[in-house]
Image: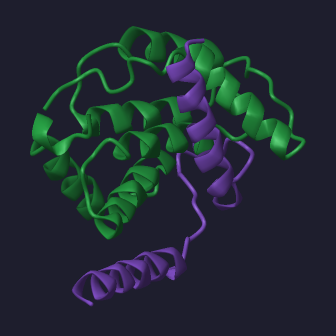
Amino acid sequence: MRTAWLEAFTWELVIAANAALCQAKGALHQPTSDGYEPARNLWESRHRQAMWLDEVVDLCRQCHRLAPFCNFNGNTFAAIARQLIQRLRLPADQAHIVRSWAGHIVAGTADEAEIIQFRQLSRGLTAEKLRK
Amino acid sequence: MTSTQRKLLHEVVRDGLKIQSRFSAAPVYAITGQGSLKSEGVATLQQIKRNLKKRRANSVA
């Protein structure tokens, strides 16, 4: 099922999340000179579009790789992707595994099997499998 | 920001803090092209399974 998973996740929200995560660790929250604009443009051009869940998670991975912020890009975008898994009607143990796959994909550490399994799950989603 | 977005932000920050120690602060993925993530271990999954087992046992009793 393709839907606008990230519709509510504006770039302003992404910035606020990174600011809060940096503040918690006393790290500098600042845009990078080379990654910020490409990541912002990519996010803003796509976050309202209807996509498969695996496409959304890959968008988070691409933004992580572009590194729009000086610190904590990884957990900023991984936490956004993991948040989307909350919308799936899954038993707790399965939800944990799927959240883990999403986190690995965004972190850039997922192996081929995880990517394939996540894609299969994503393409098999129907409206009934989502929480209201 | 709408109230829905504030709630989402709160949830994202909460989860982001939970997994923060597994990520490098520096933009390693951008610099090297290789992602990095410390292993979570099996403790969380084991806890979830224990809770599920307990819940099932309680519902049978």
- Quadrant into which the N terminus of chain B falls: top right
Q: In the picture, one chain is purple; tell me its letter.
A: B
User: Hue of chain A?
Assistant: green
Residue B30 appears anywhere in the view:
no
Left or right of residue B16: residue A64: left
- Quadrant into which the C terminus of chain B falls: bottom left
Residue A91 appears anywhere in the view:
yes
Residue B51 image-quadrant placement: bottom left
Judge whether A95 appears above or below B61 on screen: above
Disc tally is 0
Question: Picture coordinates of residue A50 (x, y %)?
Answer: 23, 19
Question: Picture coordinates of residue A1 (x, y %)?
Answer: 13, 32
Left or right of residue A45: residue B31: right
Which of the two residues, B50 or A21, is positioned nearer the viewer here?
B50
Residue shown at 44% from the left, 55% from the top: A104
Which of the two residues, A123 or B4, is positioned nearer the viewer here?
B4
Which of the two residues, A50 or B56, is positioned nearer the viewer here?
B56
Question: Picture coordinates of residue B37 (x, y %)?
Answer: 57, 60
Which of the two residues, A55 or A67, is positioned nearer the viewer here?
A55
Q: How is the image coloured?
A: by chain
Judge whether A99 appears above or below A50 on screen: below
Judge whether B41 appears above or below A45 on screen: below
Residue shown at 64% from the left, 46% from the top: B14
Residue shown at 74% from the left, 44% from the top: B26
Residue shown at 42% from the left, 85% from the top: B50
Residue B46 image-quadrant placement: bottom left
Residue A98 image-quadrant placement: bottom left
| Residue furthest right in the image | A26
Left or right of residue B33: residue B31: right
Judge whether A81 appears above or below A45 on screen: below
